[in-house]
Image (tube, grey):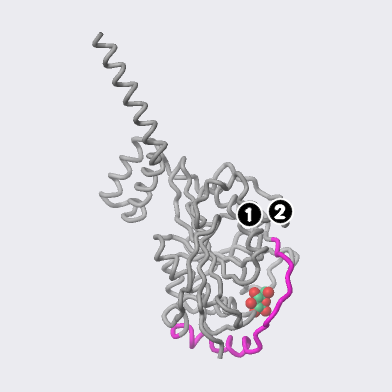
Amino acid sequence: MRRCTRFTYVVVFLIVCAALDSVINVGQLSVFLRTKLHYAYGPDTGLYSTGFKLRRNISLEYCQAVPDSLEGRLNIDLEATLQSGPPPDLQDVLPGGTWSPKSCIARQRIAIIIPFRDRQKHLDILVYNLVPVLKRQNLSFQVVVVEQYGNKTFNKGRLMNIGFTEARKHDEFDCFIFHDVDLIPEDDRNMYTCSDNPRHMSPAVDKFNYTMLYKSLVGGVLSFRGKHFTKVNGYSNLFWGWGAEDDDMHTRLSASKLSVERPSITIGRYTMIKHDRKDVSKVRLGLLKTSITRYLKDGLNTLEYKLVETRLEKLYTRMIADVGDPP
Ligand code: BGC
């Protein structure tokens, strides 16, 4: 009789656990708490080792630096649209475009920052193709689209600085990846993470026959640790219209003695979505001549903007920002 009562207790206990797990997702919650502990205190502190014990108890390890499940060369879909909602394998991405792996602890928390205006179709194609790559790479990430408000000349540098500043209010990111809206990754072995130096992730673009146009090119997709982006004072705020804000960034990197890494051109491959180039800046080459003397007085530390609206969309956070007026 006693044995029977104990059995009933065990069964009831298991049912309560299962119910709790389905309501508050205990597994996800503990991954979240341990990840926070790791990001907050790092591997060498006592507090972290408490987290480590906890982690061992339920046997969750760090994700592999380069997961076995990668596919390599990808079939990219340039016709993708998100009109009927995200595809089934993206249903578990949380509103605002955040996701974390459930079976292991992500090594870094990544903010993907996409400066944007007027190219919704390109944005849909990018997130449709990119988000599955980030998931396969087992990264903890948030996709942040920074849209310029109004219809004055585009200022990509300001938008990227705003993305960095605002993303840091949302989470403690380890790594920031500035991503053109028209570049679609062709190989998922190109890891969307940060290494010890900034990394120019897009050295091989189809439009340029998969070769580097010139040695100092850092445009397209560029990854930064937060401390490095702060060290170079972010992007210049002064480049209105198309061109050269990335060349100015290259000068900032060399002046700050930061070398730039690149993946090999076999995996750092991208397809560029075709579009017309408008608003080419006429003063960009003149401005480039002053990069070195200007960079500490023009950038994150002089950024001014007004955040008009933040919307949590299905696969990204859309921040609409007023960047001010061109001269
Ligand atoms: C522009 C860069 C651009 C590069 C490749 C250069 O002339 O200044 O902004 O990334 O061409 O298109």
Could you give the CA–CA distance between mark 2 and mark 1, rounded to whole angstroms? 8 Å
Ligand 1 shown in quarter: bottom right
Where residue 234 sits: x, y (%)? 48, 75
Is 116 left or right of 166, judged from the image as shown?
right
Asked if 255 appears above or below 122 in the picture, the reply is below
Residue at image position (51%, 61%) is: 317
SS type, badge 2: loop
Residue at image position (31%, 16%) is: 7
Q: Residue furthest top?
A: 1
State which tag comes first along the sequence, 2 or 1. Answer: 2
Query: How many C-alpha atoms fall within 10 Å of the one at disc 1: few (<14), some, or many (≥20)?
Result: many
Q: Which residue is mark 2?
A: 77
Q: Which residues are magenta?
A: 271-297
Three-letter code for the amino acid on which mark 1 is drawn: Tyr
Q: Residue furthest left?
A: 2
The mark found on residue 128 in the picture is 1
Do residues under tags 2 and 1 come within 8 Å of each other at their CB atoms? yes
The magenta stretch spans residue 288: yes
The magenta stretch spans residue 109: no
